[in-house]
Structure formats: C-alpha cells, structure tokens
Image: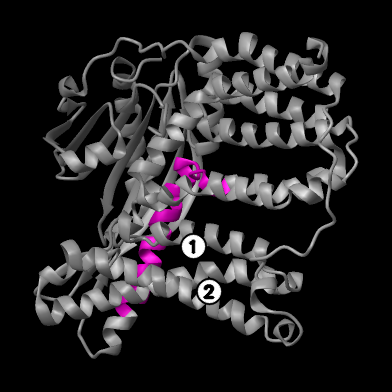
Amino acid sequence: MPLKKYTPILTILLLVSLILFMYWNVYVDLFQIWDTQEEYSHGFMIPFVSLYFLWQKKSAILEVQSKATIAGFLVLFLSLALYFVGIVGDLFSLLRFSFIFLLVGFSLLFTGYKSTKIILIPILILIFSFPIPPVIQAELTVKLQLLSSELGVFVIRAFNIPVYLEGNVIDLGIYQLQVVEACSGLRYLFPLMSLAFICVYMYQVATWKRVIIFFTSIPITLLMNSFRIGVIGVLVNSWGIEAAEGFTHDFEGWVVFIACLAILFLEMWLLSWQERKTRAWDEIFGLIEPDATAVEKTLSVPVVPVYSAFALVCIAMFLIQPLGTGEDFIPPRDSFLSFPLQIGNWNGVRESLDAKTVSFLGLSDYVLINYRDPENKQLNFYAAYYQTQKHGAVPHSPKQCISGGGWQIQDITPSNYQNIHYNRVLVQKDDSKQVVYYWYKQRDKAISNEYDLKWNTFLGAFENRRTDAALVRLTTNLSKDESLEVADNRLKSFMLLVNQKLPLYIPD
C-alpha cells in the first residue's frame, strides 16, 4: 500500500510527539506536585478517568460525521498565545490551560462541533488535576484556616469545654492547637470537588440536580473538616496532645474524607428518587452505556487540518519554546545581613525567622529588624527578597497572614507617597492597634497591587530575563493616646529613609 495513504496518520503521530516535547516540563511539574502535595494527589487518576470517558464515548464520536471548522484554528491560536506568555513568564498555570485549549482546538479542527461537544467534558476533567495559582491558593488557605478554626471551636464549645480562639490558634488552656495550612480543608476540598464533577458527568438526572451535587461538595468538605478539628480539640482536652499527632491525626483525616464521600453519594441517591422509579441505579449513575448502534466506520483523518496543526505546533516548538530555555538573570546585590541597624535616628535589633517559615515562604534572602527612636517609638521593618519567581516562589501578601495571628483588618487603602505606591493597612486585636505599610519592589518600581506585580514580572522576564522582586513591610503600634496621623507620619518618614537603602539589597 503506498506510503502516501499513511502520511496523515504519521503526521498525527509526529504531532503527538512534538506536543509531548512542548509540554514535557509541564507534565514533570504536575507529577511532582501530585507526588508532594496531598491536596493534589488525586491528580494521578484524572488522566485515566478522562481516557476512560473518551473510550466509553467512542461509538458516539464515530457516529458523528467529521467536519473541520475554522473555530479550531482560533482556539489553537489562543492556545499558542497562552503558551507564549507562559513560556516567557514561566507561568505554569497558563501553560497548563494552554494544553487544554490545544486539545479543544485539535478536536474542533479534526472532528468538528458535534464530536467536540461529546469530547469536551472528558477534556475539561483534566483541569481538576491542575493546582490553582500560588497567590490564589495562599489567600484561600488563610481564609479556610480561619473559617475551619471558628467552626471547630463551635464544635468544642458544644461539649461544654472552655476554649479561646486567637486567629488560627485554638487555646484549650493546657494545650494549644494551631490550625495550620494542612488543616485548612484544601486536601479534602480539591479531591472531593474533582470526584463530584466526575460523578455529576456520569449522573443521568436533571441538570439542576447535577449542579446541586457539584456545588454542595464545597460546604460538605468545609463542615466535615471543621467537625474533625473540633473532635481533635475534644480528644486533646480529654486524652492529651497525642490525640492530635501521628497516626491518629492521619486516620481521622481518612475517616472525614470517606464520610464526605458517603454524604455526597447519599445526596445523589436522595435526589434521584424520581428517576429510580423507572430506571435502575447503574443506568442513572452512568455505570452502563445505553445500547449503541454497531459502528463499522473508522475516524477519517482530514489532511489539510492535520498539516495546518502540524505547522502551528512547529512554530511553537522552534520560535516560542526557546524563549523559555534560558535561566533567569540574577543581578548582583548585597546580602540583607549587612543591612544597617541605624537609619537616621532609629536604632535596630535584628531578629530571625525559623527555618520552617523560611522554607515555606521560599525566600532567597530576608531581613527582620525592630527599630526604636529616641522617643522610644517602635517600628518593625521586614523585607523578603526572591531572586526568581519561578515555580511558585512568589512574595506572599501580608493580607494573607495578618489574620492568622488573630489580627483583624479594619481598613486597607492603596496609597502613594512621593512615588512610592503602597498599601496602608489598619489592623486590630482586642485593644491593640497597628498600622502596616507594605509594597512590592521590583527593579525600580514600588508596586501596591499583586496583579500589577505579575504583569511587571512578565515584562521583566520578556525584556531582560529578570523575575526578581521583594516584599517590603513596615509596622508600628498605635498607642491609645496617639492619632493615626502621627503614626502615618512616623511610617512615611521611615519609608523614605529605608527606600534610599533598598537598591543595594533589592536591585533596580
């Protein structure tokens, strides 16, 4: 048989190989995340589930007449645009979604609208194996920590146990329990939402019932995780701190997850009461496919779309991918160890963070100094430097950690003082008040908005391969007999002084 007949098929095989090469670093990064972060460990099963659903729908796909559509090219161009931005800015979140758009574009290009409608959900299921962007996850983690802590304390108090909550620390008197990041509920929330979406896809009932099932997976997870935290508090109060450690802690986590699944399936069973009058449960839940007409035809391969897609992928391979192969330029700078302890009439005492915190924040360098002036006014200065913002190493917004220490944000206002764009935050805990100024320094810019920081990071990566940045934070106590204006003037004057020193340690 002439080789020409197999040319489109060989082109597709080569196309698949090129795509694997294009996204190889994305796949490796995903595997590492699934292996090291428990909240995403379910990611290993998602690709197999997607392939299973595609195989299950093969008859329906083959029955639809293939017809290429120009929309496929538009989606592919969007995919390549995301790929370009992701490669240049080393934004793995965009690269992952670029892969999804690439698959959808190929489906439209090779099979048309009708087949893509069948294929779309199995493709979109892959999104549930993706980690959410670090900035969003950090903010979500803090909020869930606080919510879980509050609900957990409610459970403890239901057992008439005296307890005090400060931020995410549950104080039982003798023992203190800290609701850390791992107890925020994300390690249950993401897997349960993924399973809920898969179940909803298989669940053959009215659309409104499927929507309810998916979205109720969120409160089910949060309430059950909070109940778990409350039970741990009750056990610790009765049996000691051992009840919150080791095997007991992990076992309680598995019990909670199984309980969440049981509630989800019970909800599905109850909502399908009308359908169960006429259909069997395995048919309602999609465990068996309705009998399909035998299909002898095979999927034809449209030649022009295949070659066009091959050309677009080659463009990405040879023109775009090389832009991301080089290492970031790390500018020379002085270590924060040499940061002056005397600035103007302020004298400081250096402090340090524990190794666990430094590792969690992903810091390249940092400085933490408590300054005092001749009038005994105090001020805390903190700067965290990141020499590169690749693979999730990004400055953490103080908005995400202030509440964890029991402080409540009373007001936050983006401000500008002598071309320094910063955020002015007023926080309070009991009768204590503080004023916090913070901003991001990237090259010669002072940035107050996290999303502006992301855009500036992309520009820096594209223009001169620099993604370094720093968070700068100033904090001062507000005494009872002191006005906000006085505290603001103190911070503003020190901000100008410290800003003159920063270029040595955070290069322009």
Q: Is residue 486 visible?
A: no
Label 2, secondary structure: give it: helix
Residue 70, how many percent across, how many down? 88, 29
**Residue found at the very far front of the displayed protein:** 1
Type of amino acid at the residue the image marks with label 2 = Leu
Give the residue number, with chain letter if any, for mark 2. Answer: 264
- Above or below, 502 relative to 198: above
Residue 291, how many percent across, how many down? 79, 63
Q: Give the quarter of the image for residue 22.
A: top right
Q: Are marks 1 and 2 in contact (CB under 8 Å)?
A: yes
Using the image, tell me which numbered label, if any, was put on residue 192: 1
Label 2, residues with CA under 10 Å away: few <14, some 14-19, many ≥20: many
Q: Nearer the viewer, residue 68 or 294?
A: 294
**Is 312 placed left or right of 84 in the picture?**
right
Tell me the distance, in whole angstroms, between the alpha carbons under discs 1 and 2.
9 Å
Q: Nearer the viewer, residue 60 or 185?
A: 60
Name the quadrant of the N terminus: top right
**Is 354 placed left or right of 299 in the picture?**
left
Q: Nearer the viewer, residue 360 or 14?
A: 14
What is the number of callouts on the image?
2
Type of amino acid at the residue the image marks with label 1 = Leu
Magenta-drawn stretch, dominant element (helix, strand or loop): helix
Label 1, secondary structure: give it: helix
Find the magenta span and give its range.
127-153
Residue drawn at x 20%, y 36% is 368
Residue drawn at x 34%, y 21% is 387
Using the image, tell me which numbered label, if any, was put on residue 225: none
Q: Give the quarter of the image for residue 186.
A: bottom left
Residue 420, how many percent across, how many down? 46, 29
